Amino acid sequence: MQTINASVFKAKCLKLMEEVNESGEEIVILKNGKPISKLVPYKSRPRSLFGLHKGSVRSRDDLIEPLDMPWEVER
């Protein structure tokens, strides 16, 4: 996590906001050597968790097809 003095942040605010947006790295803003604020990238929250990872998980097998071997409970 990067730190920066408030006076430097004030002078380079727009450039720093672009850097945080592109890199995703947070910046802690210091005043008199003490942290006073944090600049973080904006992340929009999904409306619902249902279907959040749709299309990102793939299966190579047929999940419904029965197996050729007996289950432990059937023994």
Image: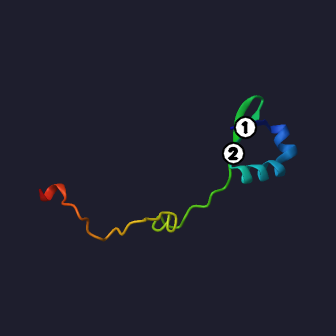
Give residue 10's position: percent from left, percent from top.
84, 44
Q: What residue type is labelled 1?
A: Gln
Give residue 44's position: percent from left, percent from top.
61, 61
Query: Sequence order check: which comes first, mark 1 or mark 2?
Result: 1
Q: Which residue is drawn at 70% across and 34% down?
A: 35
Q: Residues within 10 Å of mark 2 (few under 14, many from 20)?
A: few
| Left or right: 13 as drawn, with respect to 39 | right
Circle on res. 67: none
Q: In which quarter of the image is the N terminus?
A: top right
Q: In which quarter of the image is residue 68?
A: bottom left
Residue behind mark 1 = 2
Q: Which residue is drawn at 53% across and 67% down?
A: 47
| Left or right: 68 as drawn, with respect to 19 | left
The extreme front residue here reads: 68
Q: Tell me whether the residue at label 1 lies in contact with that at label 2, contact meaning CB atoms closer than 8 angstroms.
A: yes
| Nearer to me, 13 or 52 | 52
The extreme left residue here reads: 75
Give residue 50's position: percent from left, percent from top.
45, 67
Give residue 4's position: percent from left, percent from top.
78, 36
Residue behind mark 2 = 25
| Nearer to me, 4 or 62 | 62
* Element assignment for label 2: loop
